Image (cartoon, grey):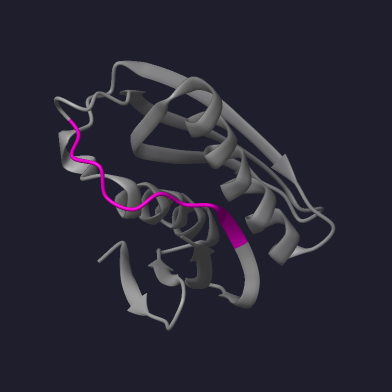
Amino acid sequence: MKFKFVEHTADIGIEAYGENMKETFANAALGLFEIMIDTTKVEEKETIEITAKGEDIQSLLYDFLEQFLIIHDTDNLVFSRVVVNKLTDDFKIEATAYGEEFDTNKHEGRSGIKAITYQRMNITDKKIFYLVDI
């Protein structure tokens, strides 16, 4: 299992899993897009490089996911696969995302995401939990 949704009163929680921190961060990003659309219908037509940095692991996750929201909002792109290429001890990440432009005829819209939140954010070696404001 890559991720699962966790019920929360006003937001949606995502619990992401992986064999290592790089895979867990990638699955956290996929969970973000699964809230918005069915990612199984997204083809890998475009490749985007994502970089983010933080002061600690929580701010790194926040900035990483925020980069995806910005790209989605500005370029109308959705992704079905994310590969984290580099994750450093000084809280920098480099990833490649594969997807395509959102198409209302192809991609059934689900919930829009307003923001990532720090509320209840929890990161361990193989599990990440975070909430999004919908």
Answer above or below: position of 85 versus 65: above
Answer above or below: position of 131 versus 83: below
| In magenta segment, residue 48 | no
Q: Position of residue 10 (x, y in %)?
A: 46, 76
Q: Which residue is farthest top?
A: 45
The residue sitting at 72% across, 63% down in the picture is 57
Q: Is residue 2 left or right of residue 96?
A: left
Q: Quarter-wise, where is residue 7 in the image?
A: bottom left
The residue sitting at 40% across, 63% down in the picture is 18
Tell me which secondary structure the magenta stretch mostly adopts: loop
12 vs 1, nearest the viewer: 12
The residue sitting at 41% across, 26% down in the picture is 77
Instruction: Look at the image and tell me in which quarter the N terminus lies.
Output: bottom left
Answer above or below: position of 116 versus 128: above
Q: Quarter-wise, where is residue 37 in the image?
A: top left
Q: Is residue 86 left or right of residue 80?
A: right
Q: Position of residue 26 (x, y in %)?
A: 45, 49
The residue sitting at 23% across, 31% down in the picture is 42
125 vs 4, nearest the viewer: 4
Specify start and end residues of the magenta stretch as a single range: 107-116
Q: Position of residue 32 (x, y in %)?
A: 42, 53
Answer above or below: position of 88 versus 76: below
Q: How many marks?
A: 0
Q: Position of residue 38 (x, y in %)?
A: 20, 45
115 vs 85, nearest the viewer: 115
| In magenta segment, residue 112 | yes
